[in-house]
Image (cartoon, grey):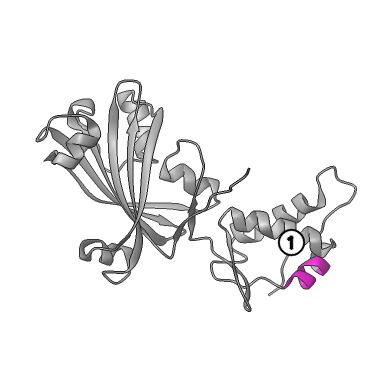
Amino acid sequence: MTINLRRADRSRPEPLWHQAEQALRTLIADGTWPDGTQLPNEGKLSEMLGVSRITIRHALRNIEEAGLLRREHGRGTFVRTSTVTAGVRGLTSFTQEMADRGLVVGSRLLEMTEVAASPEVASALEIAEGELVIKVRRLRAGNNLPIGIQNAFIPAARVPGLVDIGEPVPSLYELLKHRFGITPQVAREIYRVGIVSPEDAGPLEVAAGSPAFIVQRITSDARAPFEFTVSTMRGDRYEIRSRLQL
């Protein structure tokens, strides 16, 4: 396959590593290098882009930190566009997280119904146990590959008619903002290691008991907590990275 890779131009103001990074990102974003593709080695990339190996390493490191590549010792560097990397970030929706990583977001509504708040849900939302909440259960995907199951709970009193709307498009946060005037201001997340339940195994296309991240998130606006989400994210397609600095 012929690869249309734009070589670095030393007459341009952008640093060479930035030009190299953008050229490589383009091949991932446009599907020239799909998920699982092994990249040429540093020497070949250096030759193709007309830059030094040090420049290539800088570009590859940045792309890897963005969650678009994985390096396997003794094997090479591979595209991993179906992986979502969580870390220090602003308050964003899953849809925005996917867009920020150049992934095509996918969502399938599995359930939207009115239920009584369990003790856990009531405590998170600061409402009375048994009070009605809207449960929104969705399969979330990136580039047509399943990544996680999200179960969101929202006080029914704050979103009258939400059940009748159906699938939130493009995102639940956008719908809450424009239809109900709810704008997220702060969120608290807790991550723990868990396993995929039998109920989630089918939609996630993995065996029950497979490793997963269980993510709990409480999101508040100026009034009070308005959303409690429990997500099960596939362990092979979701990771957490942090940069530590003295």
Position of residue 59 relative to residue 11, above or below, is: below
Q: Return the x and y of residue 183 as percentages of the image width and height.
A: 38, 26
Task: Give the position of the N terminus as an image quadrant.
Answer: bottom right
The quarter of the picture where residue 148 lies is bottom left
Q: Is 51 left or right of 25, judged from the image as shown?
A: right
* Residue 236 within the magenta-colored segment of the rendering: no
Q: Is 75 left or right of 176, judged from the image as shown?
A: right
* Residue 46 within the magenta-colored segment of the rendering: yes
Q: Return the x and y of residue 111 as percentages of the image width and height.
A: 21, 49
Q: Is 169 left or right of 163, judged from the image as shown?
A: right
Q: Main secondary structure of the magenta part?
A: helix
Q: Residue furthest top?
A: 223
Q: Residue furthest right?
A: 11
Q: Return the x and y of residue 161 as percentages of the image width and height.
A: 20, 31
Q: Residue at x 62, y 45 (%)?
A: 245
Position of residue 171 relative to residue 220, above or below, is: below
Task: Give the position of the C terminus as an image quadrant.
Answer: top right
Q: Nearer the viewer, residue 110 or 71?
A: 71
Mark 1 residue element: helix
Q: Residues within 10 Å of mark 1 (few under 14, many from 20)?
A: some
The quarter of the picture where residue 135 lies is top left
What's the magenta region? 41-47
Q: Residue at x 64, y 56 (%)?
A: 63
Q: Return the x and y of residue 137 as percentages of the image width and height.
A: 25, 49
Query: Can residue 6 be seen in this snapshot?
Result: no
Q: Residue at x 13, y 34 (%)?
A: 132
Q: Is 16 left or right of 206, judged from the image as shown?
A: right
- Specify the amino acid type for callout 1: Arg
Q: Which residue is identified by label 1? A: 57
